């Protein structure tokens, strides 16, 4: 029965992958019903069969925290009008992505993604293609958050469990730099080819002068406050974020939202689909947790195993609970507990290699699919709202993730987890 309950997650995953491409009109009209139906199956299973309402409470709390965080960043960033007058050059685009990646480690991948996606689309509006958005997802929405616990939810959970704040930059800085350097080089040459194919008037006139326009600067304060609220205990954290988002929305001049072509459809789509994902992934994660001893007995787990196991699961499920699952596995195999901050801190100080591998797998593999990290699907939705044709689920994987991102992740694993 436990294995059968993994089926709703598979069904939802296939629906997200195929339906927008095969039956787009039907999916647009019914994705809410699909997500509710498959999520409802799991909810009733936990309530009526397992009688485990506590697991549902934890699940619901994680989902609400996720959506409130994503939603508050979405609303506040929607009140910031940041534009570049003039088309960006390949070098300018590369520097933009690198700067956005650094910002992601300071305000989180969600905050940086929501703040920068509209300026990114606008500055490349004369020649934008799917690869511009894909590299944005790779560099800003995922790997960029790998320098601090604020950058990505798994690293923040590790910090709350006892991993020192500056442990992250000490141990992840080098692989972060390697990944960013390689992605930047690949992007630059792809964008240079795209730039040279643009009409001469676009290249010469549109890039002649870049003028930045910034309105809604007061929302930067709200953005910083949301980042600070991440450190509050629940439910204060969520309450403060909702208050900040509402304050931003009602205090921001409506002309700024109109200039950004702001609407709530992207966050609505993410909220419905991730309701289904959060619900249906619970049996998958529970099954992994139940089988961890069998996994450990079959494989003598080395850091490289933790890297790929965490990475592969994080690419298809939410990376925060995946991170905790494999961190618990590592600690339990060494006589420790994830519920003991001293055990976590001791392991981070004296046996850092497995935790480095788990951290890299959770953060870096998030860009392999649209559902690997929360901001990914938001970027796709916002881009499509502006009329950009984004690759469907499998095209994203086979055209971009596998040929571009995966070789870099394999190199990172070989260099830092072997």
Image (tube, rainbow, N blue to C red):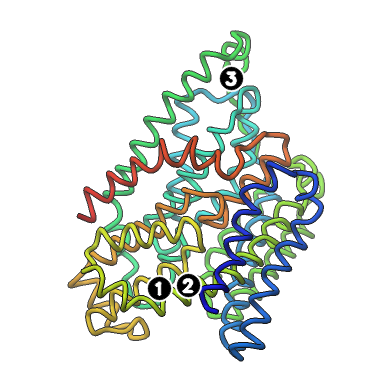
Q: Quadrant of the C terminus?
A: bottom left
Q: Which dot marks residue 209?
A: 3
The residue at the far top in this view is: 200
**Disc nearer the start of the sequence (1/3):** 3
**Disc nearer the start of the sequence (2/3):** 3
Q: Which dot marks residue 325?
A: 1
> How far is disc 2 from disc 1 in space, using C-alphas?
8 Å
Q: Nearer the viewer, mark 2 or mark 3?
A: 2
| Disc 3 crowd, CA 10 A, few/some/many (<14, 14-19, 20+) | few
> As displayed, is residue 269 above or below residue 350?
above
Give percent across and percent down for residue 18.
64, 47
Residue, disc 2: 285
Residue depicted at 49% across the width and 73% down the height: 231
| Label pair 2/3, CB-CB below 8 angstroms | no
- Judge left or right: residue 180 versus residue 92: left
**Disc nearer the start of the sequence (2/1):** 2
| Label pair 2/1, CB-CB below 8 angstroms | yes
> As displayed, is residue 383 above or below residue 65?
above
- Judge left or right: residue 191 versus residue 354: right
Secondary-structure class at tag 2? helix
Give percent across and percent down for residue 301.
24, 67
Q: Quadrant of the N terminus?
A: bottom right
- Judge left or right: residue 67 versus residue 368: right
């Amino acid at each position: 029965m436990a294995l059968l309950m993994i089926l709703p997650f598979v069904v939802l995953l296939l629906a997200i992958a195929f339906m927008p491409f095969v039956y787009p009109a039907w999916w647009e009209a019914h994705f809410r019903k699909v997500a509710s139906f498959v999520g409802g199956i799991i909810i009733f299973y936990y309530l009526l069969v397992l009688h485990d309402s506590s697991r549902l409470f934890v699940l619901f709390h994680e989902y609400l925290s996720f959506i409130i965080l994503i939603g508050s960043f979405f609303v506040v960033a929607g009140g910031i009008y940041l534009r570049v007058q003039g088309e960006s050059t390949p070098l300018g685009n590369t520097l933009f992505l690198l700067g956005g990646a650094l910002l992601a480690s300071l305000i989180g991948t969600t905050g940086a993604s929501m703040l920068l996606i509209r300026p990114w689309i606008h500055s490349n509006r004369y020649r934008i293609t799917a690869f511009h958005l894909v590299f944005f997802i790779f560099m800003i929405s995922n790997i960029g958050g790998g320098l601090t616990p604020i950058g990505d939810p798994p690293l923040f959970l590790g910090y709350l469990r006892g991993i020192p704040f500056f442990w992250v930059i000490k141990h992840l800085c080098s692989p972060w730099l390697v990944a960013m350097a390689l992605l930047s080089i690949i992007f630059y040459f792809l964008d240079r080819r795209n730039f040279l194919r643009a009409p001469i008037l676009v290249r010469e006139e549109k890039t002649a002068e870049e003028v930045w326009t910034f309105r809604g600067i007061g929302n930067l304060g709200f953005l910083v406050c949301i980042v600070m609220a991440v450190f509050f205990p629940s439910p204060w954290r969520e309450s403060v974020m909702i208050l900040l988002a509402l304050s931003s929305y009602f205090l921001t001049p409506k002309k700024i939202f109109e200039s950004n072509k702001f609407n709530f459809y992207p966050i609505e789509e993410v909220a419905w689909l991730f309701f289904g994902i959060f619900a249906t992934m619970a049996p998958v994660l529970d099954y992994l947790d139940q089988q961890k001893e069998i996994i450990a007995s079959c494989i003598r787990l080395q850091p490289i195993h933790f890297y790929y196991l965490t990475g592969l699961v994080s690419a298809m499920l939410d990376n925060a609970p995946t991170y905790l699952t494999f961190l618990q596995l590592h600690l339990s195999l060494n006589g420790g507990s994830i519920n003991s901050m001293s055990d976590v801190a001791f392991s981070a100080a004296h046996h850092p290699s497995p935790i480095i591998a788990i951290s890299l797998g959770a953060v870096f593999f998030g860009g392999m699919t649209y559902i690997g990290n929360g901001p990914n699907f938001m970027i796709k939705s916002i881009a499509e709202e502006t009329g950009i044709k984004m690759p469907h689920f499998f095209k994203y994987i086979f055209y971009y993730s596998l040929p571009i991102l995966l070789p870099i992740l394999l190199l990172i694993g070989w260099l830092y987890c072997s």
